[in-house]
Amino acid sequence: MAFDTTDVILSLIKIVVVLLALLNVTPIMVWVERRGSALIQDRPGPNRVGPLGLFQSIADALKFILKEDIIPAGAHKWIYTLAPAFGLLPALTTIAVVPWGRPFLLEEREMFGRVLFAGGRWFEPVIANVNVGILIVFALASLGVYGIVAAGWASNNKFSMFGAIRASAQMISYELSLALSAISVLLAAGSLRLTDVVWQQTGYFRLFDAIPVPAWNVFSPGMWLAFVVFVVSAFAETNRLPFDFAEAEAELVAGYHTEYSSMKFALFFMAEYMAMATMAALIVTLFLGGWDIPYYDEPATFLGFLLSVVAFVVKVACILFVFVWVRWTIPRLKYDILMRLGWKVFLPLAFINILIVAVFIALRWL
Amino acid sequence: MIPIEWFLILSAILFAIGVCGVLTRKNGITIFMSIELMINAVNLTFVAYAKQFGQLHGQIFVFFIMAIAAAEAAVGLAIFISLFHHRQTIDVDEANLMHW
Amino acid sequence: MLSVAQGFRKMLEFIVFFFFAAVAVVFALVVILHRNAVVGALSLVASLFALAVMYVLLDATFLAALQVIVYAGAIMVLFLFVIMLLNLQHIAESNTRPIQQFLGYFTSAAFAAAMIYYISKYAVLSALPPSRFNTTARMIGERLFEAYIFPFEMVSILLLAAIVGALLLSGRAAGHRAETGEELSQ
């Protein structure tokens, strides 16, 4: 494997770009959420700070920084302080294995007095193109539970504790159906590498041998069950309404972060939105063709790369809007219903879908 | 390339720490966690040898050990819950009857 | 230029190894020394995560991911659940007898010293040619479903038995307590 200074620099650039994009998701999503909820509930929403209230998020962030940072007397200080970081870690790292654009060829050129990209070099727009990509995603996502559990336990507050126990039980249960529905996709792609999953979805298949349809997984009938299960599990996994029992404010004050204030609370808030963005990116990668633009062959140049990145971002934004839309449309379920749904409906459905996909593959329909 | 012995030494240290935990603690859950630590030390040895000999068997063994550790954790914790419900303690010295 | 990068990579590997080896050992010590079981369980998570990094260094990426999913994601969450549900962190642990403590520490230290001594003395393994192999999930899967198919099926039966056993044990305990609730309260 070639490995030189250029690789290190390219990797650093990729990390910086992705991190900046991910960090900016939170303020943008807060604005979208507040304006979106206002739109759905037929009220103006925040519209005073800047045009269309766009600077509201900056004002919010400033408020968080200026608030007093309180550590309750009965709390376990160390774990109480570390918990928000535990929560943020998986949210920040999972995105590393998700491809976000079409690879393109960097041509050899003279710059800064030395030859760069000798013999041309492929630029892979993914931070870590590892051969167990999807497993890394699930491994890091499963670490997200610890932030919540640690916060709930260290706060020494019964509402925090209930929120933490509910959240972790929910996340563990739905992780199963999430992983199992992803297995259907991996079966079709024949690889755990997410770039392979995306490449498999480029191109077309012909409906009735006539109408070309993009070969995205969501369009193939064998994947419909998996898509539904995956999206619903993604809602549960990110603790979003209608499954937000971790912080059901009517029952648990604010769940696991009841006692948190100031920047520590802001970190939980950021982690939630980043996890949401990562989940959206994952849905797009697994089912909606990743960076693939339908009915258009992206050239392997910088322009094609830019177009594919735009396509990816647009798809992720659409999924994120669906998250907001669902939150303000569907009321919260009951906790026992959620668990029953997870274990008795979605888990069997995910298993059935694996069987369906296996039959499809055996018959060479996929 | 990191010499294989370093991994073996790390594994030996972790194993010894696990042994120490089992020998000196009385809290059943902590003893259980020490056993998990020992299992993991052994896993590390398996993976290190697999790498050194360029063979997969070591990794397959680790796969099986993980599956069995999961089963063991489920049953072991269930036993502790049962013990706690009967004795209100998980001190291993209190669990001195074969039947209750 | 290439050699500089290679050297950089080698140095990075060593830094990663020592950092995560230190993490694994320190947090393992916290597990056995700290009185609070929740802190112990969280430290064990950190230690097991460091071991996953070791697996990556040993070219076993599939096992590294599995380690985090199975141990950190499932087993340790189970531990934390049990500790929190039983509220064990408030129960004071009685001390073991001093002689037992001394023997425990002494034996394990002696054991570690002996192991390290013999591993470094008989360093025959380094004489073997180092093999550069990267295991993919496909390789492990093929091996599992061909040579190791029988153990694989046995493990699945074992897991089923464990589920049933765990349910029976914890479920019967709750039922039993409900029946003999008066006895316990006296």
Image (spheres, grey):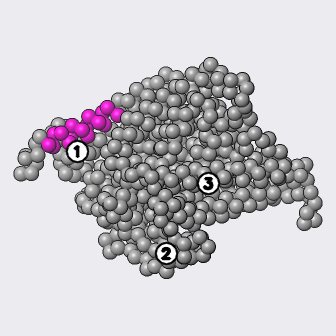
* Residue A265, above or below A355: below
The image quadrant that residue A160 belongs to is bottom left
Crowd class of label 3 (few under 14; some 14 to 19; many from 20; radius 10 Å): some
Q: Is residue C128 visible?
A: no
Front-lying residue, A141 or A248? A248
- Judged from the image, the secondary structure of the residue bearing numbered disc 3 is helix
Q: Name which residue lies at 43% across and 79% down.
A: A68
- Residue designated by label 3: A317
User: Marks 2 and 1: in contact by CB < 8 Å?
Assistant: no
The image quadrant that residue A217 belongs to is top right
Q: Name which residue lies at 72% across and 58% down.
A: A14
Q: Name which residue lies at 45% across and 63% down.
A: A83
Front-lying residue, A162 or B77? A162
Drawn side of residue A202 relative to residue A60, left or right: right
Q: Is residue C167 magenta?
A: yes
**Disc number placed over residue A40 in the picture, else none:** none
The image quadrant that residue A221 belongs to is top right
